């Protein structure tokens, strides 16, 4: 899909088309599959990682 946006940008040279391409590229980078194949955003992954680190600590 991002190839479509890149092709559009290359044809027009429009800043708006380039920004559309970058948004799709960033969206793809922000979404990643976990061990079970479930898609999680980077924010969710960081939150899960932080929970795991703090659960073992005693206050």
Image (spheres, rainbow, N blue to C red):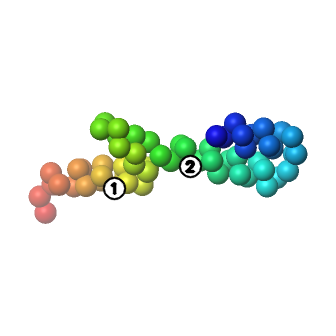
Residue nearest the observer in this picture, 58 or 47: 47
- Mark 2 burial class by Cα count in 10 Å: few <14, some 14-19, many 20+: few
Residue ranking furthest to the bottom: 59
Which of labels 2 and 1 is toward the front? 2
Residue 14 is tagged as: none
**C-alpha separation, residue under disc 2 versus residue under disc 1:** 18 Å
Q: Where is the C terminus found, in terms of image quarters?
A: bottom left
What residue lies at 39% left-to-right and 48% top-to-bottom? 40
Per the image, the residue denoted by label 1 is 47
Q: Nearer the viewer, residue 47 or 20?
A: 20
Query: Which residue is depicted at the point 72% across and 40% down?
Result: 4
**Left or right: where does residue 3 sit relative to residue 51?**
right
Residue drawn at (88%, 45%) of the image = 12
Disc 1 residue crowd, few under 14, some 14–19, many 20+, Cα 10 Å: few
Front-most of 52 and 34? Answer: 34
> Residue 31 appears at what percent x and percent y?
47, 46
Total labels: the figure holds 2
Q: Which residue is mark 2?
A: 27
| Position in image of residue 9 (x %, y %) | 81, 44
Q: Is residue 23 left or right of residue 53?
A: right
Residue at the location (23% across, 50% down)? 52
């Amino acid at each position: 899909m991002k190839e479509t946006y890149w092709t559009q940008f290359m044809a027009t040279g429009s800043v708006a088309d380039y920004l559309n391409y970058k948004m799709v590229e960033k969206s793809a980078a922000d979404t990643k599959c976990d061990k079970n194949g479930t898609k999680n955003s980077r924010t969710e992954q960081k939150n899960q990682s932080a929970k795991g680190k703090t659960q073992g600590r005693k206050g």
